[in-house]
Amino acid sequence: MASARPAGPGHDGKRPLYLIQGDDPYRARLRAAELVAALASGDARPSDLRAQRSADLGARLGLTRHDARSAEPAAIELSGASQGLFDAVDELRIVVVEHAEALKDGGVVARFPKEAALVLVSESKIQTRARRAPAKAKAAAAPVADLPSAVEAAGGTIEVVKRLEPGELGGWIAARATLLGVDLAADAITELAAAVGTDSERIDQELAKLGAFAAGARVTGADVRALVSGAIETDIFELTQAVVRHDSRVALQRLETLLAEGQAPQQILALLLWQFRVLLFASAMKSNADAERMAKAIRSSAYAIGKWQAFARRVARADVVRAYEVLYATDLAIKTGRTDPETAMTLCVLDLCGVAAADPRELVVGEPPRR
């Protein structure tokens, strides 16, 4: 989360110069909107993104917006120096530069008028360049500094808005639901967290959709499952957990629920295969940095990989390979009509739970395969 600090201009003797960056683009935009409002009003209360309703900066007087991907540095600098036609004489001029990572000239930070506020917003974390010692001591022009270094050198403030941790997710959803006027039951919070993970922008989007559907009534877990794409993955996750624990009773209950809700066997197989793939990556996870890297590799989320970490210790790579074989054989048995889909899925789940003589591969090859 963004660090809690007074948001008013010139606090602690610092000039109103800010760089907002991080790995959660939506919450970075929320923080920018919160900061602009605080600068305009002189509000020095600590940052609280849970209470920031919108990422909209508004159209207030004295505010100028630029996109660093297309704006010239000279235009940004001029915005801080010029008084708008309808601006009050004593009104703080605020210049917001979005996509600041694309700023063509970091030197504009040092040249920007100190009496105006400059808010640089990057939807990704900008890496600080490593400083190398010169090979020879000689007079030379100073290299162009990276943006974080330029902001620090100019006496500004850098705020890093981190992605939500899994342990923060439930509280964040509950707070955003309250802010948006949506009454969520406890099981709805759990279902929504499982369906969308740490995607903070999608959380707000789904809450708005659920609120419109409920029209003031309480939103239940069943509502989330019916309306939110990805909610089925909660049941698939619990089904896979039961399989890993070799709990055939719970696994079959989950399977029966999914089939009774009209989920296609092929869809269940595909999601089971995906869960085992995530499980395989989770078994190699050593740190949060590993989770982020693996998530990008398989187009998943660090949250999805992280929640499997505890269960991954129970599964060997050979178990995952065999699960792949069983899932493939089940899919083939259904497509070739060797048996009805419900029977094939039941055999598949029982086999994954370690039940003897339930191997669906026999339906394909016609004889028990070697174990």
Image: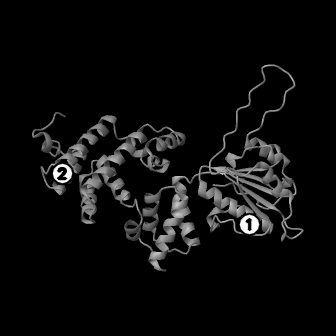
* Residue 147 percent location from the top left of the image: 73, 43
143 to 253, vertically: above or below: above
The secondary element bearing badge 2 is classed as: helix
Task: Please name the residue shown 84% across and 69% down the image.
Answer: 87
Residue 43 visible from this viewpoint: no
Please name the amino acid that badge 1 sits on. Answer: Ala
Which numbered circle lies on residue 153? none
Residue at 40% x, 71% y is 223
Is there any visible trace of residue 62 in the rendered image?
yes
Q: How far apart are marks 1 and 2 (CA)?
A: 59 Å
Instruction: Tell me where residue 356 appears, x and y as whole percent.
Output: 16, 43
Give coordinates of residue 174: x percent, y percent.
53, 67
Q: For residue 262, what is the image quadrant? A: bottom left
- Disc 2 marks which residue? 334
The image quarter in which residue 142 lies = top right
Q: Name the residue under label 1.
A: 37
Q: Bin the neighbour count of mark 1 within 10 Å (Cα to Cα): few under 14, some 14-19, many 20 and up.
A: some
Q: In this view, does 163 lie to the left or right of 63?
A: left
Percent of width and height locating residue 132:
74, 27
Q: Residue at x 54, y 40 (%)?
A: 289
